[in-house]
Image: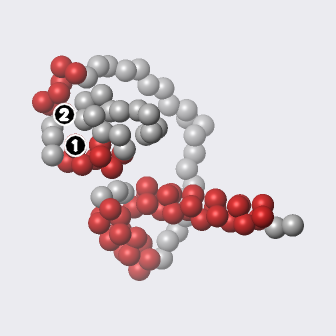
C-alpha cells in the first residue's frame, strides 16, 4: 500500500493495519460501501515452484504465523530483501 493511500473502509495506512482491522471486522457489515469491479488475469503469468526442506518450511511457517502473513508472502519478502542486498553489494564493487 502506498504511503499516501488510505483504505476506504478500514482507514488503514499499511497492509498490517488493514489486516488487523479485518481480523476483527466482517465484510458483511460494510456491504453498502463495496462495489463490483472487473478483473482480468494474464494466463501467461507464471510462478516458479521451489522445493524447501521440510524442517526449514516448518520454521518458516512458525515465523509467518507469528507475523500473521502467509508463508509464501514471508518467503517472497525475505527473498526480495536478500536479492536487493546482493544487487546493492554488487553495484558497490569497483
In-image side of 75 versus 84 (left or right): left
Q: Is residue 31 visible?
A: yes
Relative height, residue 10 to residue 39 (above, below) = below
Relative height, residue 55 to residue 83 (above, below) = below
Looking at the image, which residue sits at the far bottom?
Answer: 55
x and y percent of residue 60 in the render?
40, 70
Precedes in sequence: disc 1 or disc 2: 1
Q: Quadrant of the rendered structure where residue 61 is?
A: bottom left
Residue visible at 71% across and 61% down?
A: 87
In-image side of 65 versus 83 (left or right): left
Q: Nearer the viewer, residue 36 or 41?
A: 36
Residue visible at 57% across and 45% down?
A: 46
Residue visible at 30% across and 58% down?
A: 68
| Residue assigned mark 1 | 22
In-image side of 53 versus 82 (left or right): left
Relative height, residue 46 to residue 70 (above, below) = above
Distance, label 1 to label 2, CA atoms, is 8 Å
Q: Nearer the viewer, residue 64 or 10?
A: 10
Q: Are marks 1 and 2 in contact (CB under 8 Å)?
A: yes
> What is the basis of the colouring in this image?
secondary structure
User: Callout 2: helix, strand or loop?
Assistant: helix
Q: Quadrant of the rendered structure where residue 50 is?
A: bottom right
| Residue assigned mark 2 | 27
Q: Is residue 54 visible?
A: no
Query: Image quadrant for the C terminus?
Result: bottom right
Q: Quadrant of the rendered structure where residue 82 is?
A: bottom right
Amino acid at each position: 500500500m502506498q504511503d499516501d493511500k488510505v483504505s476506504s473502509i478500514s482507514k488503514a495506512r499499511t497492509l498490517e493495519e488493514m489486516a488487523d482491522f479485518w481480523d476483527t471486522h466482517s465484510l458483511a457489515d460494510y456491504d453498502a460501501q463495496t462495489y463490483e469491479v472487473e478483473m482480468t488475469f494474464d494466463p501467461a503469468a507464471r510462478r516458479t515452484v521451489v522445493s524447501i526442506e521440510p524442517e526449514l518450511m516448518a520454521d518458516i511457517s512458525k515465523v509467518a504465523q507469528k507475523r500473521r502473513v502467509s508463508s509464501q508472502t514471508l518467503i517472497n519478502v525475505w527473498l526480495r530483501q536478500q536479492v536487493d542486498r546482493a544487487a546493492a553489494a554488487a553495484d558497490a564493487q569497483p
